[in-house]
Image: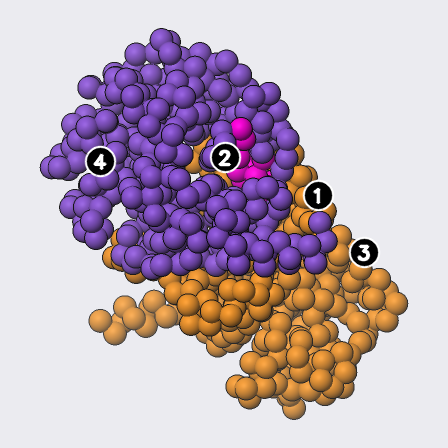
Chain colours: A orange, B purple
Amino acid sequence: MRDLIDFWVGVQAWLFETLVSPVLFQFGLMAWYEPGYGAVEFVMLGVVQIAVIAIGMRYFERRWPLEKAGTDDGLIMVDRVYTVLNKLGVIPLAIFILTYPLVQEIELALRSWGYSPPRLERLLPWIGDNALASFLVYFVLYDFAAYWLHRGQHAFGWWWALHSLHHSQRRVTVWTDDRNHVIDDLLMTLALVLFSQFVGVQPGEYVTILMVGRLIESWSHANVNMSFGWLGDRLLVGPRFHRLHHALSTPADRHVQDHNFAPVFPIWDILFGTAIYDEKIRPTGVDDAAVDADNGRGWLVQQATVFGRFVQALIPRFRRRASAR
Amino acid sequence: MNRLSIAALAFSLVVSGAARADSVIVLNSDEASYSIVSRSARTEVVRLPVGREPHHLILSPDGKDVLIGSTATNELLVLDVKSGERKQVVKGILDPYHLAFSPDGKWFVTAAYRLDHVDIYHADGFRLAGRIFIDGLPSHMAFDAESKTVFVTLQQSGRVAAFDLATQALKWNMPVGNAPAGIVMLPDDKRLLVALTGEDRIVTVDPKDGSVKGSLQTGKGAHNFFPKGDGRHYFLSNRVEGVVSLIDTKDEPKVVGSVRIPGGPDCMDITPDGRELWVTQRFLRRVAIVDIDTMKVVGSVPVGKSPHGVFMMKSTATVTAGAGMPVRAASTAGDRK
């Protein structure tokens, strides 16, 4: 294990000291020295994730596909663009630049008032002695927050306008997880970072949670006819469970997408009554012509179009507020 | 070393007081933990939890305790310096990024790096005497020999500020260069050395008025000092260059030795026998061991993520250095001559 860590940080340090550090030094950006090193790790983790998806997960999709290859296969290409932009840090960097001042202000304001984030190790000291237990506890907490945020994405019209881009894909595959509008990504990142700080997740733990969580989420979108077994499907979100959340609604099944929200642990859906387990294979997408039109568009056009939907969803609310005054 | 021998070593360290004096504390700033490393076996014995983002640690004036500052949880963890036993947690110390006692042991000062203030406490009971808000990321500290003034580097604004400890009044605030970090008062009490992390040099500053009197090229990212213990030589970590320089401060400072330490070398400490310099390698999750006579790396110990502060546990230590770093009693006595 230590050899692996040495190899990993060796590559990270070499990349940082060769490519990033000289630039930061040259332009007087030494305040970003440590974050810059973390950013290199983020990109490296992204490369690993892309490799796991492209080589590992795609093997299962080719070997045991749920939906056979068809005329809609070209729709997958744009999802690959989303994945590369996200995993290699282009979108996260933009989000970081936008959210950092706000997150920083909130954190510093709280700290200057003497508030220090709780650390679960104080309540449960045994966690501190076991790195795996500590990771799992924080991972479960993180997933709990992500579950409720996901419900929010479906509950509020303006948020659904953004999130509908993710659901509009008719060919859901391992590449679909990153198909999100940048504002949607921004809101989710902001909320999850603040939540993580509030419960005391360490920066190193946050990166690991993000890495493992996003890989599981990529897998849960896989076009694979596989099951973890009765118990396994109740412990971890798999492709069948999550595919139902992407199912195209029908008159008989109008609210099918209001189920199976959990990103990683289905326990939240089971506890809060939103879980459905069945073997029925359904087509995916959104039963709304305007949203379905996202299919076939490129990254930029999708972003612009969905932003228009988002504004339209917000404006009536503003008008109502204005008229109420 | 296999698991069984590590377990045996850990057990022996737990039961043996003598072995505890053989221990080194390393703060893993990115994972809320500190490592206990065996100096003789050069291996991590155990990793223990501490508050979030621990960066620096300091020996108490009576030499009995070592204090670890956890910046994000606003607290100090107090450990017994001989046994390593946890004695107490001092709450309400805001953002204790860097921490230091004045040479007379009466004042305890913290630099709140992210919250932009310097806090001056009465060391007895950690009673806050004054909080000075100052822009520019206050980072490292040094004191004059009489314990009247604390000098603080302001990393973002490129300045050094001097504060009167008793009144907490600003004496001066002067530009010195790009991203000043480590600062040390030389034994003559007439020269401050300041490391410029945004440049490749250190500057000599007059403690009376903050004027820059001289400059010495060392390496990119000049960052932190540690006294060799002879009252004359100082080690300097150059983070971007990946080099630790040895500087002779007699007359005009000059570089008299260097050793390549990759991975963003940062804080340092010296073994009680004065033979080894231990240097944290922030990016490599290791501590490098340098033979001081030959200035060659002779060992490397894996620890946790982003190791920052390092401290040799030793039973003979009695006082602290002005630069905010714990040192051996012998070396400090030498520096104060």
Q: Looking at the image, do the residues carrying marks 4 and 2 touch, with CB atoms under 8 Å apart?
A: no
Residue A68 drawn above or below residue B266 = below
Q: Dot 2: few (<14), some (14–19), or many (≥20) neighbours within 10 Å?
A: some
Instruction: Give the residue displayed 57% in from the left and 65% down from the top.
Output: A130
Q: Looking at the image, do the residues carrying marks 2 and 3 touch, with CB atoms under 8 Å apart?
A: no
Say what secondary structure mark 1 lies in: helix
The residue under label 1 is which amino acid type? Phe
Considering only order in the chain, which callout, 1 or 3, is on the residue closer to the N terminus? 1
Picture coordinates of residue A226, whole percent (x, y): 80, 76
| Distance Cα–Cα, label 3 vs label 1 | 21 Å
Instruction: Give the residue displayed 52% in from the left and 86% down from the top.
Output: A272
**Front-most of B136 and B285?**
B285
Chain name for mark 2 = B
Q: Dot 4: few (<14), some (14–19), or many (≥20) neighbours within 10 Å?
A: some
Picture coordinates of residue B69, whole percent (x, y): 37, 49
Q: Is residue A22 shown in magenta?
A: no
Q: Which residues are magenta?
A: B275-288
Label 3, on which residue?
A55
The residue under label 3 is which amino acid type? Ile
Mark 4 or 3: in front is: 4
Label 1, on which residue?
A7
The residue under label 2 is which amino acid type? Thr
Mark 4 or 1: in front is: 4
Q: Is residue B159 visible?
A: no
Q: Is residue B139 left or right of residue A91?
A: left
Mark 3 or 1: in front is: 1
